[in-house]
Image (cartoon, rainbow, N blue to C red):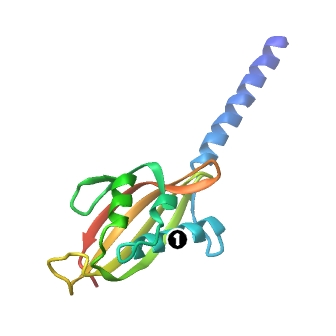
């Protein structure tokens, strides 16, 4: 009898652990009124605008271990972004076009977005440059930050 009770307890424990793991992997699109999603989209907008002006968003936005991949395939870090933020800005008309947030559990979100800027390419000061990107956000110690980014240059529509 005692053996059966231990077996049953073990079985129930395994089921609970597996169900918890399965639930943690559930994903959902953010609702329009989700406070975390609104915060992240606002930060993405500020990052898009920072191509035109030093608005100081990088230090709060990026995790210390941030790693990105540029439209040219080069890797960049938070330190690289901070250096660029403080440098001269030739672009204007910088704006976030679109951003959609998908949550994976309580502490991970991926944002799919697009943005544009005019004059980002100094050799073509009047050219509009557009890109789409995917940013991975992590919630650590109660604070949402970008841990990874992938940028892709696309034709403007």
Image vertical order of residue 96 relative to residue 87, above or below: below
Tell me which corner region of the image, top left, top right, bottom left or bottom right, holds residue 122.
bottom left
Tell me which corner region of the image, top left, top right, bottom left or bottom right, holds residue 98.
bottom left
Image vertical order of residue 94 relative to residue 43, above or below: below
Quadrant where the C terminus sits is bottom left
The residue shown at (25%, 73%) is 154
Give percent across and percent down for residue 103.
56, 59
Q: Residues within 10 Å of mark 1 (few under 14, many from 20)?
A: some
Quadrant where the N terminus sits is top right
Give percent across and percent down for residue 127.
21, 84
Give percent across and percent down for residue 66.
42, 50
Give percent across and percent down for residue 84.
32, 63
Tally of marks: 1
Q: Secondary structure at mark 1?
A: helix
Tell me which corner region of the image, top left, top right, bottom left or bottom right, holds residue 15.
top right
Image vertical order of residue 127 relative to residue 112, above or below: below
Image vertical order of residue 133 relative to residue 118, above or below: above
Q: Which residue is mark 1?
A: 41
Q: 4 or 89: nearer the eye?
A: 89
The residue shown at (45%, 62%) is 58
The residue shown at (31%, 80%) is 117
């Amino acid at each position: 009898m005692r053996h059966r009770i231990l077996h049953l307890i073990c079985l129930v424990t395994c089921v609970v652990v597996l169900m918890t793991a399965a639930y943690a992997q559930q994903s959902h699109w953010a609702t329009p009124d989700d406070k975390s999603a609104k915060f992240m989209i606002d930060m993405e907008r500020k990052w898009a605008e920072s191509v035109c002006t030093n608005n100081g968003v990088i230090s709060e936005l990026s995790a210390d271990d941030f790693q990105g991949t540029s439209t040219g395939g080069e890797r960049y870090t938070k330190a690289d972004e901070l250096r660029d933020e403080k440098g001269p800005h030739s672009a204007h008309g910088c704006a976030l076009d679109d951003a959609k947030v998908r949550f994976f559990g309580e502490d991970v979100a991926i944002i799919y977005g697009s943005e544009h800027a005019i004059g980002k390419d100094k050799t073509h000061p009047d050219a509009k440059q557009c890109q789409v990107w995917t940013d991975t956000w992590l919630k650590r110690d109660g604070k949402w930050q970008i841990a990874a980014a992938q940028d892709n240059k696309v034709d403007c529509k």
